[in-house]
Amino acid sequence: MKTWLHRQTFKPDITVAVFFGVVAIFFYGSILWTFYMSLTRSTLMPNYAVVGLDQYVKLFTNYRWLVSCLNMVIFGVLFIVGTLGFGTILAIFADRRIQAESLFRTIFLYPLAVSLIVTGLSWRWVLDPVNGLQGLMRNAGWENFTFDWLTNPDRAIYTLVIASIWHSSGLVMVIVLAGLRGVDNDLWKAIRMEGIPLWRAYLQVIFPGMRPVIASCVVLLMSEVIRGYDLVIAMTKGGPGIATEMPAKFAVDFYFARVNLGLASAASIVMLMLSLLMLLPYFYSEFRKRT
Amino acid sequence: MSSVSIRQIRKSFAGLTVLDSVDMEIAPGEFVVILGSSGCGKSTLLNVIAGLDDCDSGQILINDVDVSGLEPSQRGLAMVFQSYALFPAMTVRRNLSFGMEIAGTPKAKIAEKVAWAAKLLQIEALLERKPSQLSGGQRQRVAIGRALVRSSSICLFDEPLSNLDAKLRAETRVELKELHETLKSTMIYVTHDQIEAMTMADRVAVMHKGRVEQFAEPQKVYEKPASLFVAGFIGSPAMNFLKGYLEGTRRFKTHDVSLDASSYGFATGPAAEEAILGIRCEDVNVVERGAPDSIPATLAFTELLGADALGWFDCLGQRFSVKLTIDAARTMQKDVGFRFNMSKASFFSAATERRL
């Protein structure tokens, strides 16, 4: 039996088929099922009668959902721009052959090793108006010091931005630094021969030549934005009020807390469409390059 | 046209001497090739001239002005790199104009310069393309163009042809030489390829272990190598060597054979010392075994090269290469004798390895 098995050539096919089966059922199968549910009026339990796009209409007239989407856009733009900018500046400093570079690299990359839940909790403590930074400064004698963004409905979203920039800048730094290390030494020599100022060299020569690296960073950060759930839960729980609601949190809430399977599924499908839409420019540029 | 003086340049890196008191005087409009194997310090020397690398001591003078403390962009030089180093996200036109833009050149002047360089290098059709859409040879032209528009009278080349294939390399070699004739600017060209050095240079500087072994016209470097290293490095196949003893009477003794060397133009007075005889493959005459003033040799094999042939012989324990005609190679006997053309041979001191 054993030697018979060894002689067979179809073994790799079986392995791959099992893998594809798992992916097909649990990944794409789930997507299809979710899509199906979004077309029904399911609440706690699945209801298999298709009613059309009712749930989508409900979704886009739901104030909380619209606020969630707007929050995601504000958070996403600020977070991606901020993280890219901050991480890139760190990478440039690290690339200028500073002292103890590996120490700084570890320090800046370390936040990434901390889970978003812990990140959110820590920043909640730091930004807590009573026990955090504001309280500390007031106890130190600065009675008028005010930094209450966490509890201010207009500002709470920015505390999420600060925490997630802190969390992800190290990742961007490492990726951009790897790209910078790959820049041809002759290119730097040519830049010196032409007398190009350093900031123009980075802005007009080096970074435009690193477009694929930057694009990878943006795609990675975008997925963080759309998935954004755990940080919100740990830091603000969507509050104050619904000031920091996010689409992912909306979906989870409607699945489990408010038992509206149909609406939550519609929200999930819209999020999937949004992800694909965001990746479109990336795929387009990649595809164009091949042909 | 500018002159370049390199005076007593020294550089060591982590205890290793990279440049060991290099001296060179380069005349205005001269095409100088710095030749050497990898790690001999030739690229470092070029970087020091450009100001891209610091040296420990010594001076670089351009038109008799000391530029040692100046930034690379202030020295009035242009440079072409081995990997071309084009600005990746810019079109060819912008690659050419960007440096002038930084320097604050008026727009009309920039356009005029770009048009001139593009016409000279025949890259007018490529001006709107990105470097990634160009072939290696086209990138090379753009890199040269970027150096030309700097309108500096000195141009440095760091192995510019080594990334091209053999055919393109030969074509570009000729074009570079023509460019030099047209522009008459001073060119300093670093390479490890001796054919490039022999064909393009007005003078060749052969470098070895951070020293300039010889700085002379290519033909002189070939015919009268200044040291044992240059003799072995230049020429293909390599020069044949025989160790022996040079007597005061101008006779060279090796392995019981005594050869008359009186026709050789000695640079030094008669003195008895251990010496090495070097002879090129075309300066060995094959004669009959036992002929007067000859040494015995045995044929190992012959290589027919089309126009002529190469015979490989064993002579006094050494492998010798000898240039032969095709007919001679076909009828060559096994046991023969060698007679050397002593006026074209080279003698080196065994102690100093310098030419005698």
Image (spheres, coloured by chain):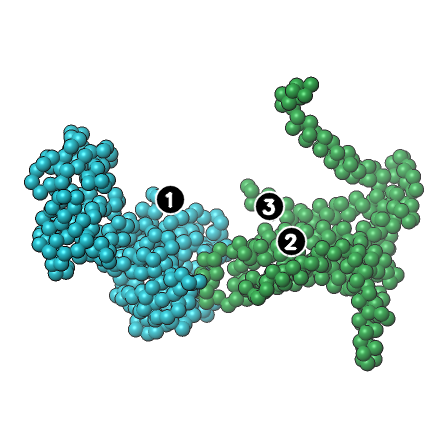
x and y, in percent, of residue A236 in the image? 84, 60
x and y, in percent, of residue B47 in the image? 39, 62
Q: Residue at x 77, y 53 (%)?
A: A228
Labels 3 and 1 in the same subunit:
no
Chain A shade in the render? green
User: Label 3: which residue?
Assistant: A286
Whether residue B157 appears in this view of the structure is no
Chain B shade in the render? cyan
Q: Horizontally, is B260 left or right of A69 in the view? A: left
Whether residue B25 appears in this view of the structure is yes
Which of the two marks, 2 or 3, is nearer to us in this view? 2
Looking at numbered disc 3 in the image, what kind of residue is underneath it?
Glu
Q: Horizontally, is A141 left or right of A214 in the view? A: right
Labels 2 and 3 in the same subunit:
yes
Location of residue B238 (image quadrant)? top left
Labels 2 and 1 in the same subunit:
no
Question: What is the total number of numbered labels drawn onto the structure image?
Answer: 3
Chain letter of the residue carrying label 3: A
Looking at numbered disc 1 in the image, what kind of residue is underneath it?
Asp
Looking at numbered disc 2 in the image, what kind of residue is underneath it?
Cys
Extreme residue in the left direction = B292
User: Label 1: which residue?
Assistant: B165
Q: Tell me the crowding category of disc 2: few under 14, some 14 to 19, or many 20 or more residues within 10 angstroms, Cα based.
A: some
x and y, in percent, of residue A232 in the image? 81, 57
Chain letter of the residue carrying label 1: B
Q: Nearer the viewer, residue B249 or A240?
A: B249
Chain letter of the residue carrying label 2: A
Location of residue A199 (image quadrant)? bottom right
The earlier-in-sequence mark between 2 and 3 is: 2
Q: Horizontally, is A50 left or right of B34 in the view? A: right
In three-dimensional space, the C-alpha distance between marks 2 and 1, rounded to whole angstroms, equals 37 Å
Q: Tell me the crowding category of disc 1: few under 14, some 14 to 19, or many 20 or more residues within 10 angstroms, Cα based.
A: few
